[in-house]
């Protein structure tokens, strides 16, 4: 029903202390390396990881978050966190690591991909890095494009994610970066959780939301329909550009390309109903959202898998 490409760990057991067997992972078919939701804090180790991956031609995917700047956080640090009494993580915690990783990529010549950008500062750093010729790419999530920290005022644990929802200024910078090519693609950062992991006090709830089933409809309704992003740009950021970034087949309608296609209906009207998700998880902040536009049919390898 779908093609799956694995990403290998950068460090053993994701501990950030010793490099994983990168060569063996690449030979086994890994298309990139990442410690996923953990930042490799050791700059020397991360430099060595970049150097080791050069022969494989695959990117390192960075979860850019300085752990020493944001211990115990539950949301973005700012006026909202102060007013509602939740511990916050400053945007600088992301910016510091984005700057470090771009500098290391410049030093080594490696390709670093910054996962889930969320701050205006990080967008600026990626833009500057690209202008200098550094091999840096980046992604953004749908929820960081359509929600701000104001959503956390409800104390809904489904608004708790890593990185946290940021300010309106950050959202505007992310949309601009997606449009001008500073940000190369959209990724859902799909993080399903059991109901029990999202219940209880906000600051004790798990981070993350499910994103696969709402991504396209959200972006068509909230970015394309109001004219914030051209439809052709969104299609590229969801298909062609991520395929190029990871050196994968697909993302194209050219003759001979894999017949993996999602057909969109820009006029489809729907209301997000978590109870109807195909995912076993329901952790979404978008329940009840009325949206226009969405996927109509999915084709994989020339076969219809989702009418």
Image (cartoon, rainbow, N blue to C red):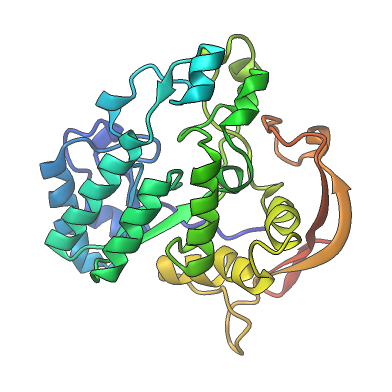
Q: x, y (%) of residue 256?
A: 58, 87
Q: Is residue 96 left or right of residue 221?
A: left
Residue 193 in percent (x, y) is at 60, 27
The answer to whether residue 122 is visible is yes
Which residue sits at x=42%, y=48%?
120
Relative height, residue 228 to residue 166 (above, below) = below
Q: Is residue 96 left or right of residue 220?
A: left
- Expressed as whole percent of the image width and height from the top left, the position of residue 141 reads 54, 48
**Farthest bottom residue?**
255
Query: Viewed as shown, does residue 165 lie left or right of 157?
Result: left
In the depicted view, which residue is nearer to us: 168 or 126?
168
**Where is 219 relative to 88, above or below?**
below
- Which quarter of the figure is the N terminus placed in? bottom right
The quarter in which the C terminus is drawn is bottom right
Return the x and y of residue 76 as percentages of the image width and height.
47, 28
- Inspect this view and state whether residue 156 appears: no
């Amino acid at each position: 029903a779908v093609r799956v490409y694995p990403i290998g760990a950068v460090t053993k057991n994701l501990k950030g202390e010793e490099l994983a067997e990168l060569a063996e992972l690449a030979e086994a078919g890994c298309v990139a390396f990442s410690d996923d939701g953990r930042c490799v804090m050791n700059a020397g180790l991360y430099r060595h990881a970049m150097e080791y991956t050069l022969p494989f031609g695959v990117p390192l995917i960075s979860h850019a978050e300085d752990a020493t700047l944001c211990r115990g956080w539950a949301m973005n640090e700012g006026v909202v966190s102060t007013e509602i009494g939740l511990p916050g993580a400053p945007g600088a915690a992301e910016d510091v690591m984005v700057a470090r990783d771009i500098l290391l990529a410049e030093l080594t010549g490696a390709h670093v991909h910054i996962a889930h950008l969320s701050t205006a500062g990080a967008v600026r750093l990626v833009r500057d890095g690209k202008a200098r010729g550094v091999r840096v790419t980046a992604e953004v999530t749908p929820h960081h494009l359509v929600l701000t920290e104001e959503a956390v005022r409800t104390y809904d644990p489904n608004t708790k994610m890593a990185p946290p929802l940021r300010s309106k200024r950050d959202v505007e910078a992310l949309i601009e970066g997606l449009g001008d090519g500073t940000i190369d693609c959209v990724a859902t950062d799909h993080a399903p959780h059991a109901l029990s992991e999202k219940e209880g006090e906000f600051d004790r709830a798990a981070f993350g939301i499910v994103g696969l089933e709402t991504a396209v409809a959200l972006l068509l309704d909230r970015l394309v329909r109001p004219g914030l992003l051209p439809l052709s740009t969104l299609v590229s950021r969801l298909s062609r550009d991520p395929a190029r970034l990871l050196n994968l087949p697909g993302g194209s309608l050219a003759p001979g390309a894999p017949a993996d296609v999602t057909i969109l209906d820009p006029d489809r009207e729907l209301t997000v109903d978590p109870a109807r998700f195909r995912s076993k998880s329901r952790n979404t902040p978008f329940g009840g959202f009325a949206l226009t536009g969405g996927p109509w049919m999915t084709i994989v390898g020339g076969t219809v898998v989702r009418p």
